[in-house]
Image: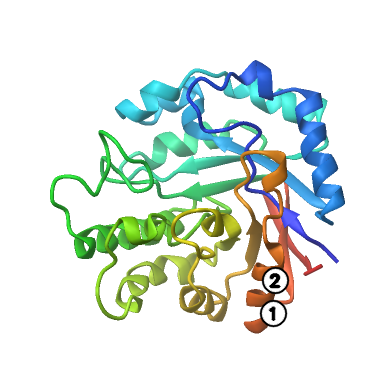
Amino acid sequence: MTLTDYHVHLRPDDVDAPAERYYSAANAGRYRTVAEDRGIGELGVSEHVYRFAAALDVWRHPFWRGYARDDIDAYCSFVREETDLRLGIEADFVAGAEDRMASLLEARDWDYVVGSVHFVRDGAVDTSGDWDVWEGGRGPEAVWRRYFETLGEAAGSGLFDVLAHPDLVKVWGAERPRPEGDLRRFYELAMEGIAESRIAIEVSTAGLRKPAGEIYPAPELLRWCVEAGCPVALSSDAHAPDQLGYRYETAIELLEGLGVRELCVFERRERRLEPLG
């Protein structure tokens, strides 16, 4: 019986959160202690790729240039040598840079790679400010369409083991308008890439902490993914120890309602299924 939390960050997203403060055995131990208290047997860390200087060989977006400071190999060594955590990374899908991202990923010995769509072209989906995709008069129809088209490309790219927060575009809740009508017309845009790849689909409780107030993905999108034969990876997208396993009881209820009885477990990018704890 297994509970997992693989989409975990050892530090907050603040640009001035230094690696040397958070990449420590003591900090990793705090995460492990909370995980044990909450029945999470499989715990991994997946730091954002854009925190590492090597990411600028993939994409030189101004947002990335502001964050890309750390040594990716030092991060890998720390996790492997000083913790008992699974070693992962959260890698953005950047259309047109697939070969460069593949080179970065294939040079390291990950247990798993979490693939995320945070940008559609140059616009940020979940970050306000200069690169906010919602600025410039873009309507919800256009943003959602482009987001789910890109999500399908990410799933089909073969770069990733897990597709993270698959409807992240809803993160802002009422703060950004949703398209009118049946949202399944957008989900359909991603399903070919998802169904063909059978990538693991992340069920993330992080949306319950955000303005969206919902699990990622929406139940209907999750149902389609499960019916397409995609397994599930359960995660909280924690950025602090107390966020581990956040409201997992809600996620488990959703999964059981869809007949999901197993979760993905990863080691050296090999996937297996274990009974849902």
Q: Residue at x 30, y 42 (%)?
A: 96
Q: Is residue 268 visible?
A: no
Front-most of 165 and 153? 165
Regarding mark 2 in the picture, which secondary structure is present there? helix
User: Could you tell me residue 51's position as x and y percent?
Assistant: 50, 27
The residue that disc 1 covers is 256
| In-image side of 33 versus 118 (left or right) | right
Q: Amino acid at mark 1?
A: Glu
Q: Which x, y percent locates residue 201?
A: 56, 63
In depth, the one of 60 and 106 nearer the eye is 60
Say which element carries label 1. helix
Q: Which residue is painted at 16% across and 53% down in the image?
A: 138
Cα separation between marks 2 and 1? 6 Å
Q: Which residue is mark 2?
A: 252
In the rendered structure, the answer to whether residue 259 lies left or right of residue 141 reads: right
| Horizontal and vertical percent position of residue 79 | 74, 30
Q: Quadrant of residue 107?
A: top right
The residue carrying pointer 2 sits among few (fewer than 14), some (14 to 19) or many (20 or more) residues within 10 Å by Cα, namely: some
Residue at figure coordinates x 45%, y 58% from the top left? 155
Q: Is residue 152 visible?
A: yes
- Please state which amino acid type lies under the numbered disc 2: Ile
Q: Is residue 124 left or right of residue 103?
A: left
Q: Are marks 2 and 1 in contact (CB under 8 Å)?
A: yes
Q: State the quadrant of the N terminus.
A: bottom right
Estimate how packed mark 1 is, as few (under 14), some (14 to 19) or many (20 or more) residues with alpha carbons within 10 Å: few
Q: Quadrant of residue 2?
A: bottom right
* Residue lying at the far left of the rendered structure: 137
* In the image, residue 31 above or below residue 189: above
